Amino acid sequence: MAVHETSCRGRFPDVKSKCRVEAELSSPFPLTGREIALLCAITPDEKIRAHEIADRIGLSASRASRLLVWKQDEKDRRAALITLSAKGLDICTKIEAVKCSCEERLLSRLGRENLKAVKKGLELLTAAL
């Protein structure tokens, strides 16, 4: 799965969830937390089936249809492939920037050694899950 070029996704597991990202995003984008999760579940160059979205985040893709493009799957005409619309891609890029900014604010409060320890601890915790 590709990751946004400017993405900080994956650097520190779940650090961004401690940020008030949803609150920061609610004013510029009239989206629910679930719609934001949906946009973040699809990378810009990804084509995904609706059931895969539901598996990832437990939300129907139809909830954010204005932000998605549906095309028939040439390999399986019974299925549709979903990609981000231009508007969805624009919003997703801005969401990622807010998330990275929030993460940087949190991480700037730690010294280098503490940051290494936190990263190692989060990696161990993630591996144990």
Image (cartoon, grey):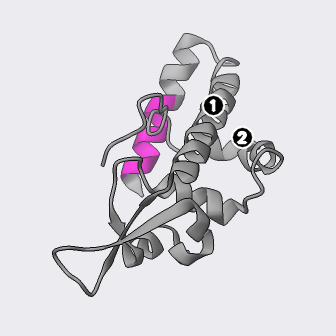
In the image, is residue 126 part of the stretch drawn in magenta? yes
Residue beneath the point at 62% across and 38% down: 94
Please tell me the numbered disc located at residue 19.
2
Q: Residue furthest bottom?
A: 78
Compared across the picture, whether 3 is left or right of 25 comes to: left
Q: Is residue 31 above or below residue 98?
A: below
Amino acid type of the residue tagged 2 in the rendering: Cys
Task: Measure the C-alpha gap from mark 2 to mark 1.
Answer: 7 Å
Q: Is residue 10 above or below residue 76?
A: above
Front in this rendered view, residue 109 or 84:
84
Residue beneath the point at 60% across and 31% down: 100
Magenta segment: 119-127
- Corner quadrant of residue 55: bottom left
Residue 64 position within the rendered picture, expressed as x and y whole percent measured from the top left: 60, 68
Q: Residue furthest left?
A: 75
Please tell me the numbered disc located at residue 103.
1
Compared across the picture, whether 31 is left or right of 80 comes to: right
Q: Is residue 15 visible?
A: no
Q: Residue furthest top?
A: 112
- Mark 2, residues whose alpha carbon is within 10 Å: few (<14), some, or many (≥20)? some
Mark earlier in primary sequence (2, 1): 2
Q: Residue furthest right?
A: 27
Residue 73 position within the rendered picture, expressed as x and y whole percent measured from the top left: 25, 74
Q: Is residue 21 above or below residue 72?
A: above
Residue 84 position within the rendered picture, expressed as x and y whole percent measured from the top left: 47, 56
Labels 2 & 1 near each other (Cβ < 8 A)? yes
